[in-house]
Image: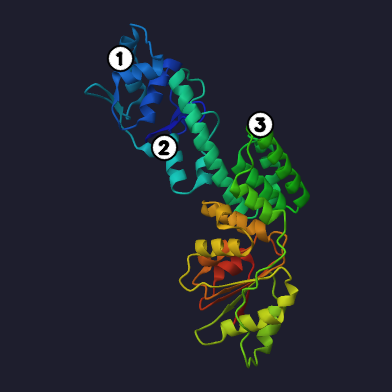
Amino acid sequence: MRHEFRVLGAPEIRLGADLVDVGHARQLSVLAVLLVDVNQVVGIDKLLARVWGDAPPRQAKAALYSYMSRLRTALGGTPIVRRSGGYVLETDPESIDLHRFRSLVTLGRPAEAMALVRGEPFAGLHGPWFAGLRETLAGEIAAAELDHTDARLASGEHLSLVTELTARTSERPLDERLAGQLMRALIGAGQRPEALAYYSQLRDRLADELGLDPGPALRDLHASLIQRPQWSPRQLPGAPTDFTGMTAELAALDQAGPIVTITGPTGTGKTRLALHWAHEHATDYPDGQLFVDLNGSDPADVVRGFIIALGTSPDGIPPEPHAQTALYRTLLADRRMLIVLDNAADTAQVVPLLPGTPRCRVVVTSRERLPGLVTAHGARPVVL
C-alpha cells in the first residue's frame, strides 16, 4: 500500500483510509517542497529559501536535518533520500494529486482533474514561495474549470450552468472566455435577451476600466449568437432523379424523432433515400440545412466547417475542441435546421455533430447499425 499525498487543499497524507501525521506546519512545508519537485533533487539552499524565505535563521539548516529524519519515520515506505547537495522524495507522481491534476489536464480530462481540487492549494503553509505557487495553481485550476465548462456546454448543460456561470463572472468580470461561456449558456437556455444585455454590460465595463473593446472572439460570438444572421446555409446536394419506391421507409422517416439512422449494405440506396426525404421536407426547416459526407472525415474538422457555415468567422472559433462543439450547439440552440450526416463510420464520429436541442432534425446514413446512437441518444433506426 502506498501513501497518497493531497496538496490541492489543506495538505494531508493518507495510507489507505488512515491519515498520516507528519508533524507541524514547518515540517509539512518541507515535505510539500519535495512533493512539488518529486523525484528531483532539491538543493539544501533551495529548500531553506522555500520554507524559511530569503533570509533563513542560522538554526534553519539544523532544523531541516531534524525534519527530514522525522519525515522518514512518519512516511515509512516512501523514501526521502539524501543526494549530493540536497534531498529527493522518490514516489510515483500519480500518488500526488498536484501531478495527477496536471496529467489529467494534459490528457484533456478536465472533469477528473477538477474533482481533485478540495480548496485552496497548500492551505495553511505560509511564505512567499507558497504564495507564488498558489497563484500559479489558481491560474491552472481556473483554466481547467473553463475547459470543464466547455465540455458541459457541449453536452447540453446550458440551463444548469447559467446560475453557476453568473456567480463566476461576478468574481472574474473581465474574463472574456468565461463571459463567452455565460453567453452560450444563456442562449442555450432560451434567454437571448439576457445574453444581449450581459454582452452590453461587459462591453461598457471593459471600456470604462481598461479602455478596451471586447476581443474578436467575443465580438464574433455576439454577432453570431445575438444578431441572428439574415441568411441560412443550404448545403444539401441535388435531389436524386427518378426516385421511386421505399414508401415504408419514407413513412418511417416522417414518424421518427429528432435523430434517425438509415443503415444497410453498400448499394441499398441510403444516401438517395436521405436526400430525397430531405428535399421533400426542406421547407420544414426554415433556418437551413447542413450536409457532410463523413467518409474519412475528422468530426472536429466538420464541426469547424459547420460553425463557419452558421455565420461565424474563422477568427471567432475557439481553439479548444470542447469549446468548438459547445459553440456549434449554441449556434443551433434556437434554430430549426436539418442536418444530414452521410456515410458515418461509427457512433463516435457522429456524436460531436449532434445538436444539443430537439429543434433540429438529424439524418445519419451508415453501413453500420450504430447501436450507440440508438441506445444513448434515442435515434430511430431505419434499416434497408
Q: Residue 213 at what x, y percent from top left?
A: 64, 41
What separation in Å lies between label 3 and label 1 (alpha carbons)? 51 Å
Q: Nearer the viewer, mark 3 or mark 1?
A: 3
What separation in Å lies between label 2 and label 1 (alpha carbons)? 26 Å
Name the residue carrying label 2.
99
Residue placed most toward the observer, 175 or 118: 175
Up/down of 128 relative to 340, above or below? above
What's the residue at 48%, 74% (across, down)? 295
Residue 81 makes an appearance in the image: yes
Residue placed most toward the observer, 109 or 316: 316
Locate the N terminus and report the quarter of the image it occupies: top left
Element assignment for label 2: helix
Q: Would residue 275 be found to the left or right of residue 116 on screen? A: right
Q: Kindly identify the amino acid type of the residue bearing the numbered disc 1.
A: Tyr
Q: Kindly identify the amino acid type of the residue bearing the numbered disc 3.
A: Glu
Answer with mark 2 or mark 1, whichever residue precedes in sequence: 1
Answer with mark 2 or mark 3, whichever residue precedes in sequence: 2
Name the residue carrying label 3.
209
